[in-house]
Image (cartoon, helix red, strand yellow):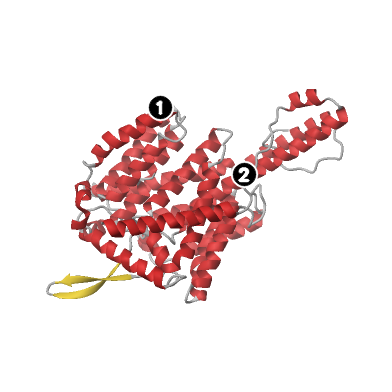
Amino acid sequence: MPASSQSIAAPASPSAGEGRELELELDEEQEKASAAAGTDWSFRFAVVFLAFYYIRPQDWIAGMAGVNVIRPIMLAWGLVLLGQGSRSPLRGWLRTPHDWAILAFYVYVVWSAPSEADAMKGMFSLVVFYYLTSQSLSTWENVLGYLKAWNVLLVSLATLGVLQTVGVDITLGKAVTDSYFGRLALGTWMADNPNALAHTVVAAIPLSYVLIFWRGTVWDRMVWFPTYAALAGWCAWETESKGAFLVGGGLTMLVFVVGRPRWIQILVVAAALTAGVGALSFLPRMDQMGDLRADEGVMGRLMAWEMAKTAMEQNTFGVGWKQFLAYIPWLEGTSWTLEPKSTHCSYVQIGADLGRYGLFFWLLGLWTAFRSMAFFKSEDETEERCRRATLLLVLAYAASNWMINREYHTEYYLLIAVASAVHRLRWAREAAVQEGETMREAEEVEADEDAEVSSASGSRKPRAVWKRLGILDAGMAALLVYGVLEVWAYILVNL
C-alpha cells in the first residue's frame, strides 16, 4: 500500500483485489483533502497572524495605533479551528515531543514566577499560538506555503527598510534611525533597533535560496532569488549590525555545506575561512571586531552579563519571568548614574530570569525542533524544502539569540510549531505505511502468493518515529545548558 495512504480500518481478511480497491478509495479521499486544504481557513489565519507579527501595521498606521488586533485574530482563529475541526493527520493537542516540551516550559515558568497569575496570563497567548499553528499546518502544501509566506514577510520587512533609505518612510522610523546615528531601524516594535532588524531580515538570504533558487525555475533563479537576496542584504548593510553579518555569513555557508559531497564541503569551508573572512572585514563597523574592549556598548553588555550570572547563581530558579534587569554605572557629565542595560542575549536573560532549570526547558524546546528536522529523511522535493527551511530558521534563531533578546517572543513558539507540524505529517505517514504493511501481510497469508503480492505492492517498510521525550532528549538539553554556561563564562573571562 502506498506510503501516503491514510489510516483506515482494515477488514479481517481482505483479498488482493479488495486491497487495491481500498487504495483507490484512499487516493480519492486524499485528492478531496488536498482540494479542501485550499479553503482551509485555519491555515489562512496562521498566515495572517504571521504577517501581523512581522509587519505590525498597528504600530505605524494611524487608525490602528493602540488597537489590539492580535486578540481578535486569535479568537477568530480558534473558533475557525474548532468549527471546521482539526485537519491535522495526527489528532490531539499533546501528541508530539514538541507539544510536551512547550507545555513543560510553560508550567515551569508559571511555577517559578513571583506572581504565578501574571506569568500564566502573560505566556498563555504564546502557548495558544503554538498549538493553533501546529494544528493549522495540516498538509505538506500548507507547511511549504507557510514557510514561503514567512520568507516573503522577511523580505517585505527588508523592503520597508530599503525604502526608508531612499526617502520613503512608511513605518515612520526615520527618527529611530537618527537616534542610532544613522543605523537603519524601523518604527515597529519588532524592528525598532538596528540589531533586531538585521537579525530578522538576514535569514531571508539563505531561506530564499532553499525556497526559491534550489531546484527552481529559470525565472526563480534569475529574477526572484537575486531580488530577495539583494533587498535583504541591502537592509542588513544599512543596519551596520556586526552580529547579523556573522550569522548571515554562517547560515549562507551552511546552505552550501549540508548534504553536499565531501569535496564540495571542503571547498566551501576553505573559501569561507579565507575569502569569506576577508570579505567580512569590508562590511560596516567590522573593523571594530579587533578591539571589542574599546566598544562601550560591548563593555556595557558584559557588565550586564556578569550581573545576570550573579543573579542566576544566587537564585536556583531565577529571579522570575521577565524580572531581571541590569543597572550599570554611567557617567553623565560630572556625575555617575545607574542606567538600565539589556543583556542583548536570550540565553543570558533566561539564565537570570529562570535559572539553570528554566534554561534547560527553553533549550529543550529548541532541541525538539532541531532533532525532528535534522534527522528527518524526506521523500520528495516538497518535504525536503520544508525540512531545510525549518532547520535554517531554527539555527538562525539559535545563533541570533546570542546577540539579541527574543527569548519570550512569539517567534520561538512559531518555529517549534512548524517543526511539530512536520513531525505530525511524518508520524501519520509512517502509521499509514505500517497499516499498509499489516494489510499486505494479511493478503499474502490468504492468497498464499507472497512473491507476487510483494512485487506488486512496491511499498517500503515503516520507519521508526520519535514519539515521546526520553532520557536522550533530557541529556541533550542538559548538555546544551552546559555548553551555554561554558560559552557565557568564557566570554566574561576573555573579553
Q: What element carries label 1?
A: helix
Residue 296 sits above or below residue 210 on the image: below
The amino acid sitting under disc 1 is: Trp
Which residue is situated farthest in the left direction here?
334
Query: Disc 2 designates what residue?
Result: 425
Q: Is residue 493 visible?
A: yes
Residue name at image x 81 percent, y 41 percent: 10
Residue name at image x 63 percent, y 57 percent: 94
Query: Disc 1 designates what residue?
Result: 263
Left or right side of 186 for 430: right
Left or right side of 154 for 33: right
Residue 324 % position (x, y): 38, 70
Q: What element carries label 2?
A: helix
Q: How crowded is mark 2: few (under 14 residues within 10 Å), some or many (20 or more)?
A: many
Instruction: Give the Cα distance between marks 2 and 1.
Output: 34 Å
Q: Nearer the viewer, residue 306 or 451?
A: 306
